[in-house]
Amino acid sequence: MLWISIGNNTLPSINQAKLIAKALKLPFAGLYMNKNNIKIGHLPSIRNLRTMSDPIVTDNSALNIEIADLIRSKDFLFLTKLELGVENTPMSLPTISDNATPAEVVEIIRSFFGLELAKHNKYTSSRQFYLQLRQKIESYGIFIHCFSDIDLEVARGVAIWDDNVPIIGINAKDSPPAKSFSIIHELVHIIKRQSTLCNEMLSSFSKQKEEIFCNAVAGEVLVPLNALNEILKQNELNIFILDDIKKIADRFCVSKEVIIRRLYDTDNLTKDDYNTHLSEIRQNYESEREANKIARQEDKNKSIPRNISKEAIDKNSSAICHIMFLGYGEGYFSQQDLSGLLGIKEKHIPKFIAEVSKW
């Protein structure tokens, strides 16, 4: 590689090149590797159900790499289980008819997976709910893992159907409440034996019928209509401000976007009110993100430190976290091994192990 040549002045430094790759939203390796020399296994056929703001953009190289990484992570899990003598969880899924209604699929999901989600108040945080939901669905032999180097607008979730181990991929950049919604959304695709790529999880006005269907199911599973109506009645709510919406969202461990969508779908919000609230929520989010960015730049010492071990747990499959915990306890993995596998420094491994041990 020319970068290792000290006398070569025609190329940017490696650090400069990394900044260029970040600005272009490309994997760093994409700047110097010949695509013909990158050995990526055969990618499954996946239907593209995304709604793209710029339909001209057709380069899916980074997305394909993330999908390949999801498959490799699944393979790593099952090879490690084999090495440790741990039995694989057999895949178990219900079947639904092609003409099943969203209401019918909701009842199938609730009964089959034992999801009594109307009692969300037993969870101390939306993150705890996300982790418990992920672990619950994975216990039926579905692999759920995050991809991290793709913008939310490009992809929020992916479903990869496989007769043995279906995969649900969710974007690590999303918040815990949004991840929970994506899990149920993609679970519907998996139950329908579909491989799909999705990016619009919140809009009630998607142009894709399949996405409208999955959004309707996920909305009712996570925010049951009877429970929502009970809260509205108890609090005598018929005009909504963002504080009201936030309280309802916290009650169900979902995002404010999901709540306004449910309010719209249940005729508690007009389309104009829905759009007004959605615009305000997203503007507040962007303002908070920009303020946090400026605060970090002005004084890094005052910024809230990242919890690296929790980030690793949130990103990685519950099953992978568990097998790493078992392997570490049996001496199969060292701290250095886990550091390399998780992409975090060794000093964070004890906290990672400590939290996984509580499951």
Image (cartoon, rainbow, N blue to C red):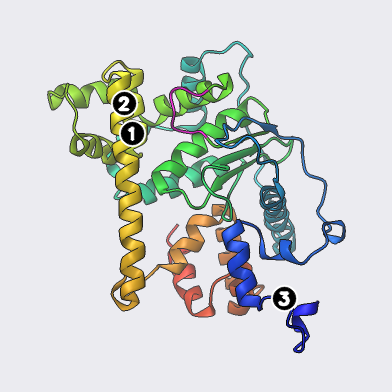
Mark 3 element type = loop
CB under 8 Å between discs 1 and 3: no
The structure residue drawn at horizontal position 30% and vertical position 59%, both measured from the top left corner, is: 291
Mark 2 element type = helix
Cα–Cα gap, marks 1 and 2: 6 Å
Q: Is residue 261 left or right of residue 88?
A: left
Q: Please name the amino acid that badge 2 sits on.
A: Tyr
Cα–Cα gap, marks 3 and 2: 50 Å
Q: Is residue 57 left or right of residue 255?
A: right
Q: Determine which residue is flagged by label 3.
A: 11
**N-terminal of the two: label 1 or label 3?**
3
Instruction: Determine the image quadrant of residue 236.
Output: top left
CB under 8 Å between discs 1 and 2: yes
**Front position in the image: 301 or 119:** 301
Residue 278: which disc? 1
Q: Position of residue 322 (x, y in %)?
A: 56, 59
The stretch drawn in magenta includes residue 282: no
| Residue range of the region highlighted in magenta in the rendering | 200-206
Q: Position of residue 61 (x, y in %)?
A: 72, 50
The secondary structure that dominates the magenta segment is: loop
Cα–Cα gap, marks 1 and 3: 45 Å
| Quadrant holding the C terminus | bottom left
Q: Please name the amino acid that badge 3 sits on.
A: Leu
